[in-house]
Image (spheres, grey):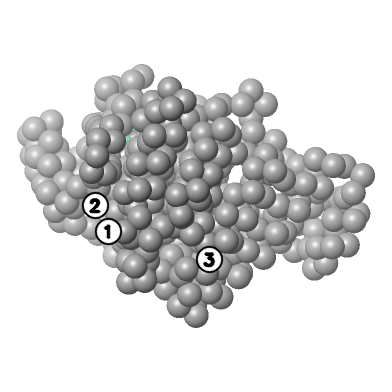
């Protein structure tokens, strides 16, 4: 299987060139034409679901904690049409093999590779009681794949929304909540990559000019005002281009540490701990677990303080919290890496108000909150830092908060 980026990275060359999210209407036309070329008929609908960055609240979702993601303008576009048999086909501009399978053979063990994310969603939706027909799906993505910006949830949620549209059902909040669960199940059970639900929730519920405060214990959510441009700020996203797969499964190991700690503390989720200081004292005999849990508690506190500041309209004020989050992820949770640290340090040295890794870590992307007129300087400094180390150029995006999954035509 070959996977390549949905859009070409261009090296930094004087004026900042960022990864282009493209124009949604033009991209919808493009994927519709591609569908027609492949299937000899027009699609019945075109939908889009975005990638995301998490402002703060990292590795808290599976602990029942809080996170504050926002949608990127970069999205995955899916053109869909029903078939009159029980066959499902999925074609992606980011993969060279076409998937074809029967509706009743899309579950765990039936589908492998990238198609597990797309076709697995249809399996999970049927498990949840959706009455689906066979369908053709053509996908095209502007979300960098494997960069920690959640291309996986973007493809899942685009397929899910496409299927709902074909079923003639309006995608209201209740339907979207069901789709979050189905997409999570597809990723965990069919693709074999357990996720905590943040990516799918923000892909389906994000609004422009807002970040989504998500409570991963009861799944309640609230839109928090987040319009950096109005405050003369911008959020710069840097894809480090690094992806360090740890042999021990870094994500799984962190998750297990948290689950073990919760068991020791007699709670279901670390979020349920009432007295963090007492809990940390109880875990003092295990240095590693102690550190992991300390990150969870301090990060939860940072999310709450970030939300208070944003509610009060103080966007500058969150900078130090972003940076503190990075240090906690680097030193206590130990999920950063050299590339992420270099991006964060360089951004801060160039005047960023705050910066941190975002997403699971071990590579992926970092964010920096910068004054709008300093975006180019910070981007140039990061590119130079990469260049000086002989690393391949980083991917650069600016990220105005954007809309969640929606039908485009
Ligand atoms: P991220 O979600 O951060 O991009 P993941 O490892 O969670 O990284 O998901 C990336 C995987 O999702 C890819 O390896 C591929 O299997 C699948 N995927 C995502 N977008 C697409 C796409 N447009 N076409 C095909 N597969 C995709
Ligand atoms: Mg993912």
Residue ID for mark 1: 406
Question: Which image quadrant: the N terminus?
Answer: top left
Which of the pair 297/141 is nearer the observer? 297
CA–CA distance in space, label 1 to label 3: 30 Å
Quarter residue 159 falls in: top left
Q: Position of residue 402 (x, y in %)?
A: 32, 60
**Tags 1 and 3 in contact by the CB under 8 Å rule?**
no
Q: Are marks 1 and 2 in contact (CB under 8 Å)?
A: yes
Viewed as shown, does residue 347 lie left or right of 232?
Answer: right
Q: Secondary structure at mark 3?
A: helix
Report how far apart the C-alphas of labels 3 and 2 lie in the structure.
34 Å
Q: Earlier in the sequence, mark 1 or mark 3?
A: 3
* Vertical placement of residue 310 versus 8, above or below: below
Does residue 275 appear to the left or right of 204 in the view shown?
right
Q: Earlier in the sequence, mark 1 or mark 2?
A: 2
Q: Position of residue 167 (x, y in %)?
A: 27, 55
């Amino acid at each position: 299987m070959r996977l390549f980026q949905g859009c070409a990275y261009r090296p930094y060359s004087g004026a900042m060139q960022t990864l282009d999210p493209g124009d949604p209407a033009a991209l919808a036309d493009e994927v519709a034409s591609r569908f027609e070329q492949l299937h000899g008929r027009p699609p019945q609908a075109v939908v889009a679901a975005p990638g995301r960055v998490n402002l703060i609240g990292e590795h808290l979702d599976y602990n029942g904690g809080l996170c504050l993601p926002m949608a990127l303008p970069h999205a995955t576009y899916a053109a869909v049409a029903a078939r009159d048999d029980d066959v499902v086909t999925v074609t992606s501009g980011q993969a060279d093999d076409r998937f074809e399978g029967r509706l009743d053979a899309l579950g765990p063990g039936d589908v492998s590779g990238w198609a597990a994310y797309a076709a697995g969603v249809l399996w999970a939706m049927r498990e949840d009681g959706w009455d689906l027909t066979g369908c053709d799906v053509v996908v095209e993505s502007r979300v960098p794949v494997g960069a920690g910006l959640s291309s996986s949830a973007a493809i899942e949620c685009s397929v899910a929304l496409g299927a709902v549209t074909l079923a003639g059902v309006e995608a209201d909040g209740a339907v979207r909540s069901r789709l979050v669960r189905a997409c999570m199940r597809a990723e965990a059970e069919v693709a074999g990559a357990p996720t905590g639900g943040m990516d799918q929730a923000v892909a389906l519920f994000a609004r422009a000019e807002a970040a989504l405060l998500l409570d991963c214990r009861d799944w309640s959510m609230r839109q928090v005002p987040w319009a950096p441009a109005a405050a003369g700020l911008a959020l710069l996203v840097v894809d480090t281009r690094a992806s360090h797969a740890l042999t021990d499964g870094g994500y799984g190991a962190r998750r297990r540490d948290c689950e073990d700690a919760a068991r020791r503390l007699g709670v279901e989720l670390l979020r349920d701990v009432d007295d963090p200081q007492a809990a940390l004292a109880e875990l003092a005999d295990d240095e590693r677990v102690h550190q992991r849990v300390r990150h969870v508690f301090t990060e939860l506190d940072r999310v709450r303080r970030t939300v208070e500041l944003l509610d009060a309209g103080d966007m500058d004020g969150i900078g130090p919290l972003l940076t503190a989050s990075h240090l906690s992820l680097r030193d206590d949770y130990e999920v950063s890496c050299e590339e992420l640290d270099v991006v964060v340090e360089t951004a801060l040295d160039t005047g960023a108000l705050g910066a941190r890794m975002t997403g699971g870590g071990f590579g992926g992307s970092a964010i920096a909150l910068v004054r709008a007129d300093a975006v180019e300087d910070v981007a140039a400094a990061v590119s130079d830092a990469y260049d000086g180390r002989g690393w391949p150029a980083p991917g650069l995006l600016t990220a105005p908060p954007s809309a969640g999954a929606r039908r485009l035509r």
